[in-house]
Image (cartoon, rainbow, N blue to C red):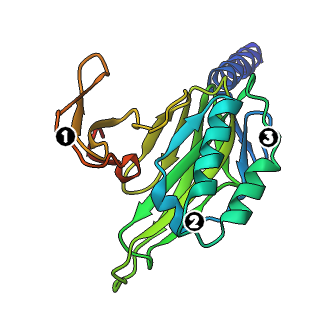
Amino acid sequence: MKKLLLLCILGTLFTSCIGDSIQTIKDPQPSNLIKNIEIPFKEQGYSQHSSKILSSQKELDRFLTQVGNDEHWNNKTDFLAKIQDTPINFKTHNLLFYRITEGSGSVQLVVKNDEIFINNNEVSITIERTVPNIGTDDMAYYALVYKVAKEIKTIIFETEQQDVIIENKESDMIVPKNCKAWFDGCNYCSQTKNAEGVCTQMTCFAYNPQDFRCTKWDK
């Protein structure tokens, strides 16, 4: 009887310790830490902008002005309205604009915004990607926008092909934390041991950060 009681106590303590260390939350609307802003998912206009994190009203206003001056959008009005109608306190939150580029419009993407996982200061969002046997030969551009609490350190977009790890800090052109080499829209860059970017010094007639692509991942 004493042995059984001791095992029960040890089991309770072990379970409690595991629970305290993991602290994983599965919440359909963890709006105090991260909230999805439901912009149009697929939009040709996104091709003109790189992924970015905005940490001030000034940066947001600049971004919205750029979008307002853009051409070749299908639904610019709805995009602008959804962001402008979302209250953001930049003392506590940042705004993440995350662009996804697909080489074929026939690729199907499903974002699991109803299953966002939060583990300590890390957010994980799953994107399911289905590639048909026969695809169309056209570029497709998608975007996601989230209001993210500044206490969140990283946002991870998980796919079967490649996870993308983004640090939650101001950046006009996001270089994922696990990207070791990339094209920045003009030059080719690589990450040093100090996590700093070193780029070639080519002279470009036009610098196009929206053409950013990672060429080597740290898997």
Q: Earlier in the sequence, mark 3 or mark 1?
A: 3
Quarter of the image for the C terminus: give it: top left
Q: Residue at x 27, y 42 (%)?
A: 182
| Location of residue 65 in the rendering, given as x and y in whole percent from the top left corner | 63, 47
Give the residue type that dot 1 points to.
Thr
Residue 96 vertical position relative to residue 171 in the rendered view, above or below: below
Comparing labels 1 and 2, the label whose residue is closer to the camera: 1
As helix, strand or loop, the secondary structure at mark 3 comes to loop
Question: Toward which corner of the image does residue 76 lie, by quadrant?
Answer: bottom right
Residue 93 vertical position relative to residue 114 in the rendered view, above or below: above
The crowd level at tag 3 (other Cα within 10 Å; few <14, some 14-19, many 20+) is few
Residue placed most toward the observer, 137 or 81: 81
Distance of label 3 from label 2 (alpha carbons): 20 Å
Question: Toward which corner of the image does residue 184 lie, by quadrant?
Answer: top left
Q: Earlier in the sequence, mark 3 or mark 2?
A: 3
Give the residue type that dot 2 points to.
Val
Give the residue type that dot 3 points to.
Ser
Residue assigned mark 2: 110
Residue placed most toward the observer, 91 or 22: 91
For the residues bearing labels 1 and 2, Cβ distance under 8 angstroms: no
| Location of residue 212 in the rendering, given as x and y in whole percent from the top left corner | 35, 48
Residue assigned mark 1: 203
As helix, strand or loop, the secondary structure at mark 2 comes to strand
Identity of the residue furthest to the bottom in this view: 134
